[in-house]
Amino acid sequence: MLILLPPSEGKAEPGVGAPLDLASLAFAAELGERRAELIGRLDPGLRAAPAAPAAEVYTGVLYARLDLLGLPRAARTRAAKRVLIASMLWGFVRPEDRIPHYRLPPKAKLDGIGPLSAWWRPALGAALPDKPGELIVDMRSAAYATAWKPEQAKLLAVRAFTEANGERKAVSHMAKAVRGEVARALLLARREAKDAESAAAIAEAAGFTVELGATTLDVIVRP
């Protein structure tokens, strides 16, 4: 199982700490050159800025509900192996990867690069694991999901809806909270989800009302 998370718009700024070390980040061999190119175009000063684990830098509703830093030791160990955080600057990083504070909206266009999702797509396709039948639980927003999709693994997108008087509506802000809570439930589960059905069962056991589709796990939130 892999859990794909979006970054957060809000980010904590590390006050002190060693600077960014690109060679220490996940997929350094495959994505390092692209990361260096983006930093050079966006802000070369990021190389000297204090860095901290991504789990501390990314804040916001999803990360508050997930609470990576507050997970029990076993769940944190699982998160270190199973969680990947999407980013238009880094491609993907793991929770313990040390990064500086930065700003780069997903729809930003940099000179000589163009749309970032399309620019990242070939490199991410070559770098990320894509094993036949492996479960990938996708918490990313659409802007980040377009940068990479597996061809062989089972991608399960988590969506959130409200339902009242028989009418169902997709939600945006609440979806971040729901995704954070579902991700936390998956990491806390005694047995790791191996397929979509077991992921849905874990979410139900955590108190969610869910509907499982071919490629989606819908969480229904009732007022």
Image: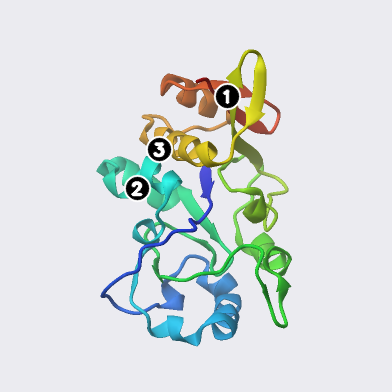
**Does the rendering let one see residue 133?**
no
Q: Quadrant of residue 116?
A: bottom right
Q: Earlier in the sequence, mark 3 or mark 1?
A: 3
**In the displayed structure, would residue 48 be above or below residue 144?**
below
**Mark 1, residue position:** 197
Circle 2 Cα neighbour tier, 10 Å, few/some/many (<14 / 14–19 / ≥20): many
Sort mark 1 into few (<14), some (14-19) or many (20+) by Cα contacts within 10 Å: few
Q: Which mark is residue 184?
A: 3
Question: What residue is pinned by disc 2?
Answer: 68
Along the viewing direction, whichever of 174 and 207 lies nearer the viewer = 174
In the rendered structure, which disc, 2 or 3, sits on the residue that comes first in sequence? 2
Q: Decide: marks 3, 1 in contact (CB < 8 A)?
A: no
Q: Amino acid at mark 1?
A: Glu
Whole-percent x, y for residue 130 in the image:
64, 51
Position of residue 23 measured from the top left corner of the image (x, y, whole percent): 45, 77
Q: CA distance from mark 3 to mark 1?
A: 17 Å
Q: CA distance from mark 2 to mark 1?
A: 24 Å
Q: Nearer the viewer, residue 220 or 206?
A: 220
Q: Earlier in the sequence, mark 2 or mark 1?
A: 2
Three-letter amino acid code at the position of disc 3: Arg
